[in-house]
Image: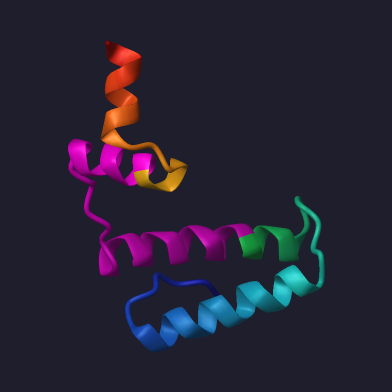
Amino acid sequence: MLKTIKTPEQHDIALARIYALMQQNVLPATPEGDELEVLAVLVEAYEKKTFPFPKPNPIEAIQFRMEQLGVTKEALMEVWA
């Protein structure tokens, strides 16, 4: 029986089961496929609660993306000029 994940140990067990099911290439609409889908939902809920990911500052997000693309402030200013 599947239950909500409340501890790191339960999280590890759920991840191991997900991995095992994925290695079997289970099909949707089968008992194993349904188990995989439910486990994924439970793990996602636990991880969102346990490992919150803060939203980035918009300016920092733009600067990060510019850095990834190798775009300088000067090059950006040329586009707007």
Instruction: Decide whether the magenta segment is chiefly helix, strand or loop.
Output: helix
Q: How is the image coloured?
A: rainbow
What residue do we see at 27% from left, 41% from top? 63
- Which quadrant: the N terminus? bottom right
Image height check: is 17 above or below 57?
below
Left or right? Give the position of 47 relative to 26.
left
Image height check: is 62 above or below 27?
above
Could you say where residue 20 lies in the image, as x and y percent from the top left? 71, 78
Left or right? Give the position of 18 relative to 21.
left
Viewer-nearest residue: 51 or 21: 51
Could you say where residue 76 lies in the image, as x and y percent from the top left? 32, 25
* Residue 61 is a magenta residue: yes
Left or right? Give the position of 34 relative to 71.
right
Could you say where residue 33 lies in the image, as x and y percent from the top left? 72, 59
Image height check: is 3 above or below 80?
below
What residue do we see at 64% from left, 65% from top? 35
What residue do we see at 28% from left, 30% from top? 74
Image height check: is 60 above or below 10?
above
Q: Which residues, given as a range, are shown in magenta?
A: 37-66
Q: Quadrant of residue 3?
A: bottom left
